[in-house]
Image (cartoon, rainbow, N blue to C red):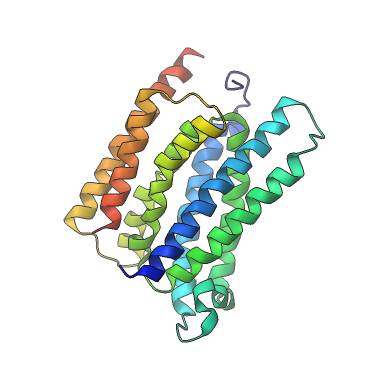
């Protein structure tokens, strides 16, 4: 396991994981805005989402996706998928919260419970990792 | 939920999971044997191709549904990827990791059926 001899600072894979998550959250908001702006459900090709490319917001979203993708590739180099992927789902907390704050979408009581469950799951995954890090 | 959206959601999910496995394999190959691993290009290409399919299907779905409803379906990928990584990539999957991944998936599903 190459977790012992990994770089620090900007090149730290845990920092890159956080960066990747931040880019994903921003990209989802941009893509939703852009896709909604250009929605034309009547055309035959609309299921492919290709007409979303008419929106500049979608292109900014794509840039964020690429940035998050590069960070993610770097993460994969150092952290096992069984740990990195569950932790990356902190976006499933950040995205609904951002939808609520920035897009004015509503969050029901059940949805809040789901978000709470995700947070607990994240803590369960992160705890042994944090212990591992302390020892190093 | 009607049938067609379900097919598109499922397809975007499967291509996403498969893509992640290919990418992990590709990046692992860069640490294992130094530079110039012969399979790096094709593994990375396959991963990116699958992720691209998943991406455009997701855009098409976004035009029809709220993001906060749609996006969490990808949450099922947490538990699927944890098992897939353990089986296909032979990563160590502890009980605690499994429970954590299951809780995250359950939470995300709960969010998505609201």
Question: x and y percent of residue B99 in the render?
Answer: 32, 31
Instruction: Name the outermost residue toward the bottom.
Output: A42
Question: x and y percent of residue A64 in the render?
Answer: 57, 57
Q: Which quadrant holds residue A74?
A: top right
Q: Which quadrant holds residue B95?
A: top left
Q: Is residue A55 visible?
A: yes
Instruction: Name the outermost residue toward the front.
Output: B3
* Image quarter (top left, top right, bottom left or bottom right) of the C terminus of chain B: bottom left
Q: Is residue A23 visible?
A: no
The residue located at (48%, 49%) in the rendering is: A22
Nearer to the camera, A104 or B31: B31
Nearer to the camera, A111 or B78: B78
Q: What is the count of numbered marks?
A: 0
Q: Is residue A116 left or right of residue A130?
A: left
The residue located at (45%, 82%) in the rendering is: A41
Q: In this view, does A105 lie above or below B13?
A: below
Question: x and y percent of residue A135 in the render?
Answer: 47, 13
The residue located at (53%, 27%) in the rendering is: B91
Instruction: Name the outermost residue toward the left.
Output: A109
Q: Which quadrant holds residue A105?
A: bottom left
């Amino acid at each position: 396991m190459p977790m012992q001899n990994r770089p620090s600072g900007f090149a730290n894979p845990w920092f890159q994981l956080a960066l990747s998550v931040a880019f994903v959250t921003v990209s989802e908001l941009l893509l939703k805005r852009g896709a909604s702006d250009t929605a034309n459900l009547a055309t035959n090709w609309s299921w492919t989402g290709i007409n979303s490319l008419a929106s500049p917001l979608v292109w900014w979203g794509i840039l964020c996706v690429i940035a998050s993708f590069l960070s993610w590739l770097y993460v994969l180099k150092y952290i096992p998928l069984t740990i990195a992927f569950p932790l990356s789902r902190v976006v499933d907390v950040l995205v609904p919260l951002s939808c609520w704050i920035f897009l004015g979408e509503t969050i029901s009581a059940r949805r809040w419970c789901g978000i709470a469950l995700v947070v607990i799951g994240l803590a369960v995954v992160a705890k042994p990792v944090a212990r591992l890090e302390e020892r190093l | 939920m009607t049938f067609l959206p379900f097919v598109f959601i499922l397809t975007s999910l499967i291509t996403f999971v498969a893509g992640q496995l290919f990418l992990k394999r590709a990046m692992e190959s860069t640490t294992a044997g130094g530079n110039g691993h012969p399979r790096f290009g094709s593994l990375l290409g396959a991963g990116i191709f699958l992720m691209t399919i998943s991406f455009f299907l997701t855009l098409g779905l976004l035009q029809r549904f709220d993001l906060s409803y749609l996006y969490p379906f990808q949450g099922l990928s947490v538990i699927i990827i944890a098992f897939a990584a353990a089986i296909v990539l032979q990563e160590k999957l502890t009980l605690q990791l499994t429970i954590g991944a299951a809780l995250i998936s359950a939470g995300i599903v709960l969010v998505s059926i609201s």
